[in-house]
Amino acid sequence: MTNNSLSLKTAIDKLSSAKVICVGDVMLDKFIYGEIERISPEAPIPVLRCISETSMLGGGGNVARNIIGLGGYCKFVSVVGKDSAGKELISQVGKLKNLDARLITDPKRQTSIKTRFIASNQQVMRADTETIEPITSETEKLVLDAISREASDFSAIVLADYGKGVLSDGLAQKILSMAKTNKIPVVVDPQGSNYFEYDNASIVTPNKKELQEATGLAVETTEDIVAAAMKLMKAKNIKAVLATRSADGMTLVHSNGKYDHYPAQAREVFDVSGAGDTVAACLATCIAANIPIDVSVKLANAAAGIVVAKMGTAVAYNDDLLGSITDIGAEENEKKVHSLQSLSKTIIEWKKMGYLVGFTNGCFDLIHPGHLSVIQKAKSLCDRLIVAVNSDVSIKAIKGEKRPIQNQNTRMAILSALSAVDVVIKFDSKTPTDLIKKLEPDKFFKGSDYIDAEIPESKIVESYGGEVVFVDLIEGHSTTSTINQIKKIPSH
């Protein structure tokens, strides 16, 4: 397989064949968003006025979320306490498709919770509630039993070690031994400095701090990274090291001393929470899908770039990854095309940032000044504008078999090139009602020619408190009239 964008697309298509076992510490990631407007009179600390709160799977749970988000199937094995956080985690994993979760309850343990307090898009504090003691031998046996069952049906294992006790006291080595017997490659997202636990791993993914702690060597330059990785591989019989280096990207070092460096791909960093989870998950999913290691790392690098541009413990979805890879070397505007899944997450982030989200739709078949006027006026009334485009199938259903004149990819590419457009998304039905129900934009823009019409979108928008805005049109412009004029031009 060659390393061009076409082969990367092919690799992404293969991710749906991946079956991965994920084992490790699970935690509940809580995010409390608010505003800081004053200093406490009780102590010289800021006062956060809480506005909203969300919670999601963290730690190994986020690794599992990323595996299924990329299209793979995951068996997730971990341990929770008999408490409200444990119940919430069990509830959350139960709602996810393609995830076989085996969360073992230990009444003597406290479920790990990481609570992050965020103001002005920045994390101002984190509070941890957790048990970090090793799991008991009885619980360890239950974990091993859950892993060994159907192990031969899986093509990769990822160990998500966050130092909370699930993978301590030799369990990692037992899993690696079992994997060796079954010839299953193992990816390790490591913790701490004791890499004895990870002997014979296929690949480990330490960040700079973890690599430095494990080897005692400097990790400032690429040469430093390679030297430290080589020391680690020789000492622990590890086949490869992927060192993640934040803004400096990541470096893959092979046991023969060869290495490749991959620059960071994120254009805007909002939150690095969970980026390491995404890298480990993407690597394991790629390996399970029998994708070569160099291509796997390229995809993992792209996935990391996607999640750090999102708020919270984020997931890189298959469609996100496809969009990112398709756009390697392309213009920025081509990245505006979204799937419903990725756009749903983007809108949540926009609203957390206080952006007013607008939405308009149409066929946009042969874009003319009337279209441009609506789009420009709509953008002037919102912070982010989504343009929904009828697919080729839906246009044929509305206007007949001879339409559209331009296919959906061409129409979306032209719209993406407009500076007033932030996101382009296609839909297959005659109207975008399903999209609006799921996205709930703040404002829905429609041409003033519909002002007296019964439009199905209105009731939906008004039902959740949105606003329908009618935009004045430039008269004398329509695709149909343009087509009729072209027909009158004599052919030569």
Image: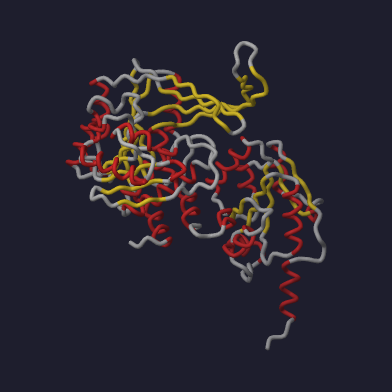
Q: Residue at x 30, y 47 (%)?
A: 253
Q: Nearer the viewer, residue 409 or 275?
A: 275
Residue positioned 73% across, 60% down in the render: 371
> Is 149 left or right of 457, judged from the image as shown?
left
Which scheme is used to colour this image of the protein?
Answer: secondary structure
Which residue is situated farthest in the top direction here? 42
In which quadrant of the rendered view does residue 62 lie? Answer: top left
Q: Toward the viewer: 405 or 328?
A: 328
Residue that appears at 70% across and 48% down: 456
Along the line of sight, which residue is nearer the eye, 145 or 293?
A: 293
Q: Is residue 147 above or below residue 13?
A: above
x, y percent for residue 124: 55, 26
Q: Position of residue 410 (x, y in %)?
A: 59, 65
Q: Is residue 382 above or below residue 82?
A: below
Taking the image as shown, residue 165 lies to the left or right of residue 174, namely right
Q: Is residue 422 above or below residue 486?
A: above
The answer to whether residue 192 is visible is yes
Depth check, front residue: 433 or 270: 270
Quadrant of res 37 = top right
Total marks shown come to 0
* Residue found 76% across the figure and 49% down from its top: 454
- Say which quarter of the image contains residue 104: top left
Name the quadrant of the N terminus. Answer: bottom left
Q: Position of residue 255 (x, y in %)?
A: 24, 47
Point out the image quarter for the C terminus: bottom right
The answer to whether one can see residue 67 in this image is no
Q: Position of residue 329 (x, y in %)?
A: 50, 59
Q: Residue furthest bottom?
A: 492
Q: Is residue 130 above or below residue 430?
A: above
